[in-house]
Image (spheres, helix red, strand yellow):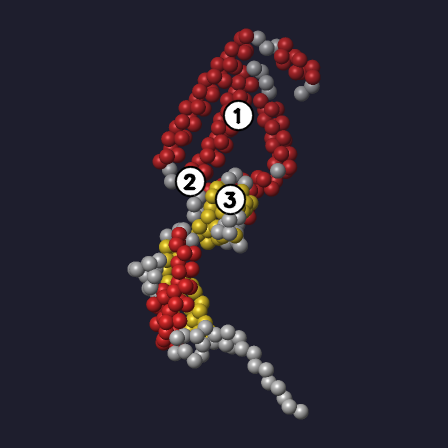
Amino acid sequence: MKWQDIKHFFASLTLEKLIPALVILAVGFALVKLLMKLFDRLSHRSKLDHTAFGFLRTLLRVLLDGIVILIAASGLGVDVSSLIAILGVVSLGISLAVQSTLTNVVGSLTILTSRPFRVGDHVQIGEQSGIVREIGMTYTCIDTFAGQTVYLPNSSASTACIVNYSANGKRRLDIDVAASYEDDPDAVKAALLRAADCPHRLADTATFVGIKEYQDSGILYELQLWVKNDEYLTARFAVNEAVKRAFEADGITFPYPHVELVSRSK
């Protein structure tokens, strides 16, 4: 659009054109507001995550407002088809400039619609483990148990291997404990089962203990029990302490590497 065309456009504006356009804007924005209220009501009935609704609400509002503005501009005599073409070219340029951001936004939509995890869940995404604090448009924020805050790009989070420990409400606790070859395996397993009988163990689940492997300095046993997900770390510490007390009470020895020095006389 040339400068002369712009001058001609503003010079051709009259009350007969402005009033209908203003009415279209007023009525259109009122209808958009009404539709957004209806959308908000539906959000309370839907099972879709509230973060997804917030994101979709913004997209819908921008789209509807844009349609109203285009209709009003058409009433003023603006060539809407040319405007749409210009907006398309501009949108393409912007999309190429912010390609990584758009990829993260698409990843956000994937997470919010498939819902592999929610805010507050204990998850492991790739190599990062912690509590999900926020699922944003471009990043997912995780608070680790080491007190760190990790921001994962949604493009990576949506394609990574995700383990959601909060999905079932319980988690299996696996503890490896080594004992000396001189100790009776049945006595070792009995001590481990006694150590596993702690308040954190879920009563309606089975506890397992067995020999995992034979090592150079001792036998490695594996103890498995089920605990609540939010008590996992507390249960691990408690059971480890209980194992030491049980071994000391039963006279079971923790093995450690031995080095024998042999001197040869000439």
Q: Secondary structure at mark 1?
A: helix
Please give the residue where the numbered disc 2 appears in the rendered image: 49
Distance of label 1 from label 2 (alpha carbons): 26 Å
Front-most of residues 137 and 204? 204
Query: CA–CA distance between discs 1 and 3?
Result: 32 Å
Residue at position x 35%, y 58% in the image = 200
Q: Which residue is mark 1?
A: 66
Q: Is residue 43 left or right of residue 160?
A: left
Is residue 134 left or right of 101 when viewed as pictured?
Answer: left
* Distance Cα–Cα, label 3 vs label 2: 16 Å
Relative image position of residue 263 (x, y in whole percent): 62, 86
| Label 2 packing within 10 angstroms: few (<14), some (14-19), many (20+) | some
The C terminus sits in image quarter: bottom right
Question: Which amino acid does the dot numbered 2 rest on?
Answer: Asp
For image coordinates 38% across by 40% down, the residue present is: 47
Residue type for callout 3: Cys
For mark 1, does the 10 Å Cα neighbourhood hold few (<14), some (14 to 19), or many (20 or more) residues? few
Q: Quadrant of the N terminus?
A: top right
Query: Which residue type does callout 1 highlight?
Result: Gly
N-term-proximal mark, 3 vs 2: 2
33 relative to 260, above or below? above
Which residue sits at x=60%, y=20%? 79
Residue 204 appears at what percent x and percent y? 30, 60
Residue closer to the observer: 139 or 94: 139
Does any portion of residue 165 appear in the rendered image?
A: yes
Dot 1 or dot 3, earlier in sequence = 1
* Tag shown at residue 141: 3
